[in-house]
Amino acid sequence: MEEKNSRRDFLKKGLSTTAFAMLATSQANAFSMKNPGRDAKNPKYIGQVGKHFVMVLDLRKCIGCQACTSVCKVENEVPDDQFRTFVTETEIGEFPDVRKAFLPQLCNHCENPACVPVCPTGATFKREDGIVVVDNTVCWGCGYCINACPYDKRYFNKRTKTADKCNFCAQRVDKGLLPGCVETCIGGARVFGDINDKNSDVYKLLSNFSTTVLKEAEGTKPQVFYINLDSKVEELFSTTQSLDDIVKAEEGFQREWMKTREEAQSNG
Amino acid sequence: MDSVNTIISTITIAKPWGIDIPNYFWFTGSSAAAFIISSFAHVFGWEKYKPIAGVSLLMAFVLLVAAPLNLIDDLRQPGRVLNFFMYGWENFPTSPMKWGVLLLMAYPILIFFEAQALYRPYFVKQAKKGGLLSKLFTFGNMDVSKEALEKDHKKGYILGAIGIPLALAVHGYTGYIMGAVHANVMYHTPLMPIIFLASAMVSGTGLLIILIPLFQRFLSSRKKVDRDMVATLARLLSWFIVSDLVMRFLWLTFSLTFGNGEKYALYSYFTLHFADTFWIDYVLCLFIPLVIGFTKLRNIPVVVYFGGIVTAVGVWIFRWNTVIGGETIPRTTPGYLNYTPPAFGQDSIVSVLSNWGILFALVCAVLLIFPWDEEMEDCYEGVENAK
Ligand code: SF4
Ligand code: SF4
């Protein structure tokens, strides 16, 4: 009897401790329509109220040097073989009527993003200044947003194992700096700023030049605008013809997809 | 126009969903189908399906218990499952994945209670003999009077009636997940939930055609297969195949001929995969079973089993072609992507096989716990007495 009692005691204590622990954790992770960072009105999550950040890419000035590609990897600690931004290099025509064309690509920080409304954890959202971000402490890695983005501008970060993408270098912008790629752009092709500010370069460029966005038909209203975008370059997006790309060339066509997957696992 | 361009370099971004996802869709779909078939008897009162209604219900249950494990395995951060329940509720109207939480929780509970109501009298019988587990499953109600049985029956009917839309939703929502992705030419059609449901009915019936005779022959006290039932299921399968084909016909004819610019991508996909889609998915896995069910061939069990197997496999292939195939279609880089599932690790061939292993274990468990054999026997006796 003695023993039974102590066992019951133990069970009782165990149960109450577990219940308490559960209550405590649920307090810490209180149920939320959004996510804890946004609920706490953390400035990193809210952004710069009243501003609306956009980027203009002046393709006349891009020389395809990939300085932006490299600086982004350093600034944002993007793992090997993964990219938040890159410049597609193409050749149009055949000798002697030939020219190079470059297409710098990054998340378009869409006004009507396809990636945000499908997120089941609220990890990805649009800040009040228009920057679309991912909270990598909340994301559970379902990949829905990655499939939803028409621009393929999201990927699973091998290190954090969460969805990742360009955040316009919000960490820099919030300190009054420019995004890394804009700062480093040799030709001055990347221009960044607040469209609500009539003195900003982006406002002036958008007012004085005709600009285009990628895949307008998707209805996502991209906030990255291109000057001098050639429809022949954009056509590459939908061609099913297999042209070479870096990973394909180095790793072989068969392995490119699997490779990223395996690396993600071996990093874990 | 392609010829004027040459890509010198670009980056291909990996796609997120692997082999687990088609497998998940197949499981939820087959579960929904098994539930609907069990409702033929429990809700619509079709006596013909009565003997297999109980087992079908149990199969619907185990398929749905095993299914979500695929989802967890596909997550890159499976430890954060709680976040899914806690956060992001403002996206509820626009994220079909979110709907899954409620459906995946409500549906198996409902099936469990329906099965409990159906088998309660048998549990009572066993509990009286001293079965502890059976006693538990009677929920303390040992009453087997006519009124009590009538009450069970009514409870089963109500749960079954609520369960039909729930079963349709539990699979239909997966079609929604896909259809909502307007960035993907293969996924993006409002028909997707219906196409998924139609093919689910096919795979679920195919699966029952394989399982029920196995149970009857080797595990029941009758020790013999009900050949009439096999023929009935074969015919039912054919009707489901007809509805599946109609849905797919509508989808493909619209998107391939009347679609916008993206129809070229789809057209090219189906040209590239013509042999495997047309000959395997359509001719072997749909058309041949369709012929079996609508002709005298349905009276030859072996032929019907063959039809059952190929349709179940065929729908799995269809899920794969839709989910994975859709991801391979280029949208920012030229040329198709290629996906071969890894053999081991998360989201691999072995993880899918393990999921099947879990399903097998669950099937064994419910067959051991639930007195399905006795109930089936009673139904057959009921039918024979009526004759
Ligand atoms: S480009 Fe893609 S990831 Fe970026 S906001 Fe638009 S839909 Fe989302
Ligand atoms: S991968 Fe993360 S950010 Fe993307 S939809 Fe899933 S939970 Fe949201």
Image (cartoon, helix red, strand yellow):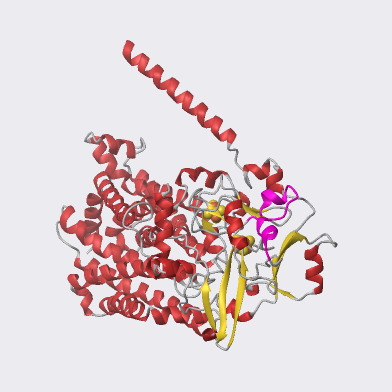
Q: Please provide the residue range marked out in magenta.
A: A167-186
Quarter for ligand 2?
A: bottom right
Q: Residue at x 33, y 16 (%)?
A: A4
**Quarter containing the N terminus of chain B:** bottom right
Indicate whether residue B210 is drawn in magenta. no
In the picture provided, is A119 more to the left or to the right than B253? right
- The x and y percentages for residue B79 are 46, 43
- The x and y percentages for residue A156 are 50, 55
Q: Residue furthest left?
A: B223
Q: Residue at x 53, y 60 (%)?
A: A146
Q: Is residue B271 above or below residue B206?
A: below
- The x and y percentages for residue B44 are 39, 62
Q: Is residue B218 above or below residue B311?
A: above
Q: Nearer the viewer, residue B27 or B240?
A: B27
Task: Please indicate, yes or no, whether residue B142 appears anywhere in the rendered image.
Answer: no
Q: Nearer the viewer, residue A42 or B10?
A: B10
